[in-house]
Image (cartoon, rainbow, N blue to C red):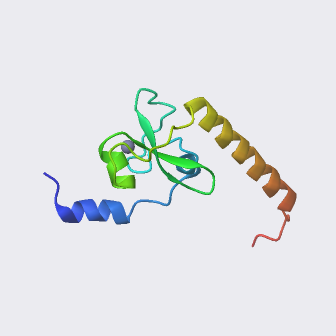
Amino acid sequence: MYSQSSISNRRSSRPAPTEETLFGLTCVICGTDYRTAPTVDALVVSHSGDGPTMACRGVCARMASGSATGLDEAPLSLAERVRRYEAGRARKQAGQARDEQPGSDA
Ligand SMILES: [Zn+2]
């Protein structure tokens, strides 16, 4: 049995969502990586700036969206989410390389 304090400690210390989470590659609640757990049923639970965020069907989806089945929205395929994630990362890296000012970072 979980104590309330350990649960709230865990939740408050949860790190900010990673890029993988924002692109729907990992569960926003438990962090399951859908690329390595393809059998997990991932559902759309909300939208970030980069796209739909996902959570596992059941407890995770209910914690994230209030419904065990998430939003009534068909998720993108895992392959498509990976493609968008890779494209977003490449875009960001290209932007960083362009903005880089050698020596200005003290
Ligand atoms: Zn989950």
Horizontal side of residue 24 vs 80, given as left or right: left
Question: Where's residue 63, x and y in %?
Answer: 33, 53
What is the residue that sits farthest to the front in this orientation?
72
Question: Where's residue 60, x and y in %?
Answer: 34, 47
11 or 103, which is in the foreground? 11
Horizontal side of residue 14 vs 35, given as left or right: left
| Residue at image location 40% in from the left, 33% down from the top | 41
66 or 18, which is in the foreground? 66
| Residue at image location 44% in from the left, 40% down from the top | 43
| Residue at image location 42% in from the left, 40% down from the top | 32
Horizontal side of residue 95 vs 20, given as left or right: right
| Residue at image location 48% in from the left, 30% down from the top | 36
The image quarter in which residue 65 lies: bottom left
What is the residue that sits farthest to the top in this orientation?
39
Question: Where's residue 92, x and y in %?
Answer: 74, 52
Q: Looking at the image, in which quadrant does ligand 1 appear?
A: top left
The quarter of the rendered structure image containing the C terminus is bottom right
Horizontal side of residue 38 vs 23, given as left or right: left
Question: Where's residue 81, x and y in %?
Answer: 60, 38
Q: How many marks?
A: 0
The image quarter in which residue 95 lies: bottom right
**Vertical relation: 24 (above or below) 103:** above
What is the residue that sits farthest to the left in this orientation?
1
75 or 17, which is in the foreground? 75
